[in-house]
Image (cartoon, helix red, strand yellow):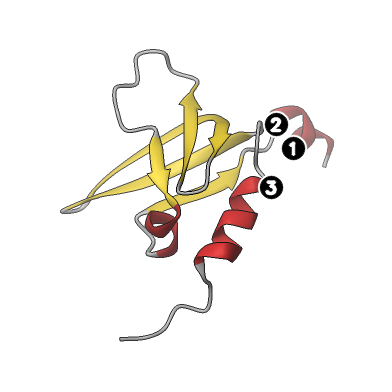
């Protein structure tokens, strides 16, 4: 098994930097299935974090552990605003 270059503490610090910001979430559901959505990182807790989706009808999971990010099942990145992209 190849050791990951990150640990849970570094993943937690990276995610805490996104607190109350808009993020894009990519979730690997297995068997070549995935889900993508945008939302606001609404909670950062000792064992997990939560994302509040912008789509009110989203019925998927909205809370994940830091271990799921560490192993690659969940990917989080900050969403850039269109106004910022147009200015560049």
Q: Quadrant of the rendered structure where residue 67 is?
A: bottom left
Compared to residue 37, the image places residue 25 above or below, namely below
Q: Residue 22 at what x, y percent from top left? A: 62, 32
Q: Which of the two labelled residues, at mark 1 and mark 3, occupies the earlier sequence position?
A: 3
Q: Are marks 2 and 1 in contact (CB under 8 Å)?
A: yes
Q: Which mark is residue 17?
A: 3
Label 3 crowd bin: few (<14), some (14–19), many (20+), radius 10 Å: few
Disc 3 on helix, strand or loop?
Answer: loop
Label 2 crowd bin: few (<14), some (14–19), many (20+), radius 10 Å: few
Q: Residue 24 at what x, y percent from top left? A: 52, 39
Q: Residue 10 at what x, y percent from top left? A: 60, 64
Disc 1 on helix, strand or loop?
Answer: helix
Compared to residue 66, the image places residue 8 above or below, namely below
Task: Give 30 or 87, whichever is nearer the viewer.
Answer: 30
Q: Which residue lies most toward the right here?
A: 87
Quarter placement of the N terminus: bottom left
Q: Which of the two labelled residues, at mark 3 and mark 2, occupies the earlier sequence position?
A: 3
Quarter placement of the C terminus: top right
Q: Which residue is mark 2?
A: 81
Compared to residue 57, the image places residue 36 above or below, namely below
Counting every numbered tag in the picture gives 3
**Which residue is at a point 57% across and 47% down the rendered structure image?**
77
Q: Which residue is mark 1?
A: 85
């Amino acid at each position: 098994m190849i050791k990951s270059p990150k640990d849970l503490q570094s993943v937690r610090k990276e995610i805490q930097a996104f607190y109350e910001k808009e993020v894009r979430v990519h979730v690997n559901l297995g068997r070549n299935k995935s889900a993508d959505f945008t939302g606001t990182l609404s909670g950062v807790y000792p064992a997990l974090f939560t994302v509040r989706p912008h789509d009110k009808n989203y019925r998927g999971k909205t809370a994940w552990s830091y271990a799921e990010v560490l192993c690659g099942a969940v990917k989080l990145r900050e969403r850039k605003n269109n106004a910022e992209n147009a200015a560049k």
